[in-house]
Amino acid sequence: MEVKVALVTGGSSGIGAATARLLADAGVKVYAGSRRGTFEPARKDVIPLKMDVNDAAALEAAVQEILSREGRLDAVVCNAGNGIYGPVEGTTEEEARYQFETNYFGVLKTIQACLPVFRKQQFGRIITITSVMAILELPFQGFYSSVKAALLSLTESLALELKGTGIQCCSILPGDVSTGFTSARKLNEAATREDSPYKEWMQKNLKQVEKDELGGMSPDVIAKAVLKQLKKKKMAMRVIPRLDYKLVAVLVRLFPAKSRLALIKLLY
Ligand SMILES: NC(=O)c1ccc[n+]([C@@H]2O[C@H](COP(=O)([O-])OP(=O)(O)OC[C@H]3O[C@@H](n4cnc5c(N)ncnc54)[C@H](OP(=O)(O)O)[C@@H]3O)[C@@H](O)[C@H]2O)c1
């Protein structure tokens, strides 16, 4: 594998930690960035970095530290992220911006910190962790769907712009994964209002969403998808792990929007 050194953001938990572990098992030196700055269980080939993806200076310092220690950076897995929950109606602009801060601008800052290195090397791999929700909207997660759709578009536009430079982009769209994501989810103020017209629907819906996530696949499945792409000469553009989610993606494309939304409403 050409990738010898990688930065994984959100490496302290869930998909990021599983990815860091699997890449290291495959012989990659991994830098696992997160605000906690921890990686457990500790191992020599995974170096935890304390950094916030919303802090451009911290990202720059992280990239410089990797370069000074390794002399190269071959891949970045933009994985750090979070979710908010609540109806579009009543969600404040501040809450909506919070969703875009880490999941969109944090990824943008991460990519922009790595790109000069990749350009100089004429080699680099950029993987963004988006979600099947980038192509499949669910009620009360409109901002999460929006931000993942925006990130998917950004990844694909970037891939176009970088064609022929030796730098490749790929987005991985996981379905439900059992991680710390569920407990870290923030409820918007409008989601907790006693007089909300959506109150009963949201209570039922959130229970189902949490059950689906906690009963979802292991983060190792996503880690394997990341490793598989990094091993390839040419990475795929979009990867949807697991056959059932691949089928969902096909159905999403086949159904006209109106019937798709009617079906989602029935299910959720
Ligand atoms: N779980 C799912 O069902 C699922 C499905 C589709 C896509 N995803 C996506 O997968 C990615 C990873 O989520 P996960 O499921 O593994 O959740 P998780 O267990 O909560 O992990 C999230 C990671 O992101 C880090 N993080 C959050 N904000 C950060 C920031 N500002 N700067 C640096 N690191 C930050 C967290 O570490 P610190 O708190 O230490 O900073 C943690 O390591 C996210 O982008 C999520 O949207 C998850």
Image: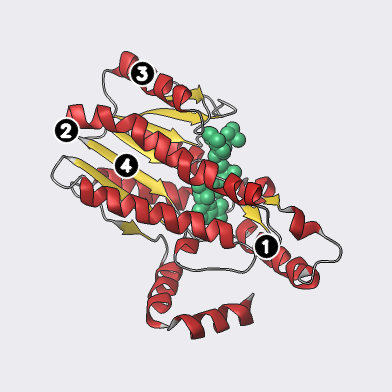
Q: Residue at x 64, y 52 (%)?
A: 84
Query: Which badge, 2 or 1, is on the more N-terminal residue?
Result: 2
Whether pointer 4 and pointer 1 mark residues with C-beta atoms closer than 8 Å, the reply is no
N-terminal label among 2 and 3: 3
Comparing 182 with 191, the one in front is: 191
Query: Could you tell which of marks 1 and 3 lies nearer the N-terminus?
Result: 3
Residue 7: % across, % down:
39, 31
Decide: few, some or many residues near mark 1? Use Cα within 10 Å; few <14, some 14-19, many ≥20: some
Kind of residue indicated by mark 1: Lys
Q: Secondary structure at mark 4?
A: strand
> Which of pointers 4 and 1 lies earlier in the amino acid sequence?
4
Left or right, residue 4 beside residue 83: left
Identity of the residue drawn at 68% across and 64% down:
87
Check disc 1 and report its element: helix, strand or loop: helix
Question: Disc 2 to disc 4, how far (Cα)?
Answer: 13 Å
Q: Tell me the number on the disc at residue 126.
A: 4
| Proximity of marks 1 and 3: CB atoms separated by less than 8 Å | no
Q: CA distance from mark 2 to mark 1?
A: 44 Å
Q: In the structure shown, which secondary structural element does the residue marked by tag 3 occupy?
A: helix
Kind of residue at badge 2: Gln
Neighbor class of circle 4 (other Cα within 10 Å; few <14, some 14-19, many 20+) is: many
Give the quarter the ligand 1 occupies.
top right
Q: Is residue 225 left or right of residue 71?
A: right
Question: How far is disc 1 from disc 3 in space, using C-alphas?
Answer: 41 Å
* Circle 3 residue: 64
Q: Which mark is residue 35?
A: none
Q: What residue did someone put label 1 on?
A: 211
Which residue is denoted by mark 2 in the rendering? Answer: 122
Quadrant housing the C terminus: bottom right
